[in-house]
Image: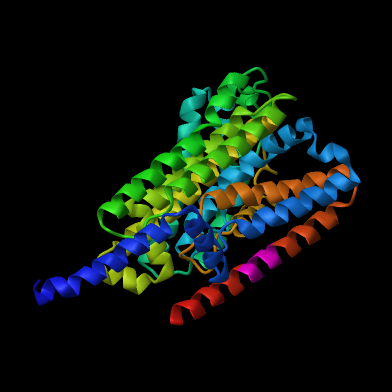
Amino acid sequence: MSDETKTKGPLLDRSDSRVAHTTTFGGAVKAFFDRVRSGDLGSLPVVVGLLVIWTVFTSFNPIFLSSSNLVNMLFDSSTVGVISLGIVCVLMVGEIDLSVGSVSGFASAMLGVLWVNHGWPVWLAILAAVAVGAVFGAVYALLFNRLGMPSFVSTLSGLLAVLGMQLYALNHTGSINLPYGSWVVDFGQTMIMPKIVSYGLALLPGLIMLWAGYSSIKRRSAANLSAPSLTGLLFKAGLITVMIEAIVFYLNQSRGIPWMFGLFAGLVIAMNYAFTRTKWGRSMTAVGGNREAARRSGINVRMIYTSAFVLCSMFASFGGVLAAARLASSSEQAGTGDVNLNAIAAAVIGGTSLFGGRGSSYSALLGIIVIQSISNGLTLLDLSSALRYMITGGVLAVAVIVDSLARKSRVSHGRA
């Protein structure tokens, strides 16, 4: 046996044993707790917080977790949830967009003006509203990339300018009622999935997780790298499928799953794939983590920032269209109030880092459910809206503190 073979043999043996260890179910569980100790908490804090919120409100009013009330919550959370999905994009690269509320309000106004006042086909009015949102995002990206204007300043300017455009567009009427009986209004207020469709769609997240996880296991095993446990993957996908099917079954005891929430959930899944399975998504994480390192590695940093701002404004515009459908009107109040703050808070509460480089599309989903649960629970208890702002602010502060502590923990473990 040659010296080279003698040298390589033990190394290969150790590598194989390491792969075997990490692919066991026990190894997967141990890896999960290791990630938690190292500060990689994922969605754990928001899930725990959501359970606490639901337990408290249910103890005061059992109607809170009734299927009919939860269906109403799904309707109400979809509009701001879509806007929050865009906020996740800009937070991923370490920036912010303060104008999403105004952009959503202007998109709502455009829908009413073009569709009702000027007789455009509704689908064309929706496309026009979303396209204008893309233009706003492109302007913010231009100011950031070419002129170095901080996103806080440029989007704050945009908030005021776009709000003025909204008021100008609705100047003569103040509000425009959308036609009752149209599919747009029905979609926002009454359209519910057939039960068989909801049960079928509930299988998709688990199947997608299983497919993506198994593909990853095969690639890593082929490269002789440690891979997640196949047993653990099957258990996780099965558990998630059972949980979602149980939720769908419970909601179907009332009206069922709103199509509008199904659209929101579909966008969340699509963006999760884009963030985790595409070169663009990996580049987003790299730019948010370290802009200079990303530039030196060959990533087109300006393009990544542009895509983040454009997507954020497009999601804001689409959220405004959904809000108009939900309210059956386009008004001067659309996009004002706490829409802007709730969209940003939902992304942060859901687990997207304010420091950039870490986040998930699911944070928009979890975060908006937390905020809507607080709002709905306080309404059922007939408590002042002042409490809603204070509690939401407290939850947001806790989320940022947890994120900051987790970040410090990850840094210390990285140095170790």
Q: Is 305 in front, or is 218?
A: 218
* Residue name at image x 51 percent, y 38 percent: 205
* Residue name at image x 58 percent, y 19 percent: 196
Q: Is 207 in front, or is 282?
A: 207
Q: Quadrant of residue 99?
A: bottom right
Q: Indicate left or right for 106 with 383 as reference.
A: left
Question: Is residue 188 placed above or below 27 in the rendered structure?
Answer: above
Q: Which residues are magenta?
A: 396-402
Q: Indicate left or right for 48 with 57 as reference.
A: left
Query: Residue 176 location in percent, x, y?
Result: 66, 31
63 magenta-colored: no
Question: Is residue 376 placed above or below 176 in the rendered structure?
Answer: below
Query: Residue 336 location in percent, x, y?
Result: 68, 49
Question: Is residue 53 placed above or below 393 in the rendered structure?
Answer: above
Q: Main secondary structure of the magenta part?
A: helix
Q: How is the image coloured?
A: rainbow
* Residue name at image x 51 percent, y 73 percent: 410
Query: Residue 325 location in percent, x, y?
Result: 63, 31
Q: Indicate left or right for 244 with 226 as reference.
A: right
The residue most toward the left is 2
Q: Is 367 in front, or is 230?
A: 230
Q: Is residue 350 visible?
A: yes
* Residue name at image x 84 percent, y 57 percent: 387
Q: Is residue 337 visible?
A: no
